Image (spheres, rainbow, N blue to C red):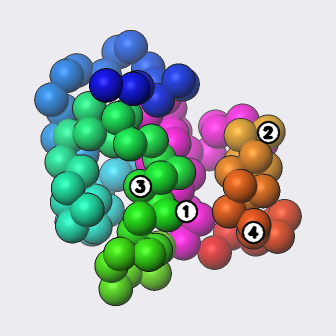
Amino acid sequence: MNRHPDRSSELPSGLPVERMRNLGPASARMLRSIDVHTADDLADIGALAAFIRLRAETTHSPSLNLLWAMEASLLDIDWRDLPPALMARRREQLGEPMGTDN
């Protein structure tokens, strides 16, 4: 399986998404709705793809804050510490204007 290129090697295999840093019960429910149950699942699909699927395949309307939380959870860092270049790249990939949070 392909792993998220920036995934922290410190994340235990099989860690439930609700136990990942930055992700709580509401985020975990949304992720489970697209069959993302563990850190491995999220690493396999990647945060951006999971975010796009949530927007396209569910009734959820996730904000960019969820994307930042997922990206940071894979790196095992606080979402506020995400590199600005990564955030800008993700906004560009989504076609989102710079400086918006939602």
Looking at this view, name the residue that lies furthest to the right. Answer: 98
Mark 2 or 1: the one toward you = 2
Circle 4 packing at 10 Å, graded few (<14), some (14-19), many (20+), is: some
Q: Which residue is mark 2?
A: 85
Q: Main secondary structure of the magenta part?
A: helix
Q: Amino acid at mark 3?
A: Ala
Mark 1 or 4: the one toward you = 4
Circle 3 packing at 10 Å, graded few (<14), some (14-19), many (20+), is: many
Residue 8, relative to residue 4: is it above or below?
Answer: above
- Residue 28 in magenta? no
Q: Amino acid at mark 2?
A: Ala
The picture places residue 57, in percent across and down from the top left corner, at 35, 75
Q: Which residue is mark 3?
A: 50
Range of magenta residues: 63-84
Q: Amino acid at mark 4?
A: Glu
- Mark 4 or mark 3: name the one nearer the start of the chain: 3
Q: Which residue is mark 1?
A: 65
- Mark 3 or mark 2: name the one nearer the start of the chain: 3
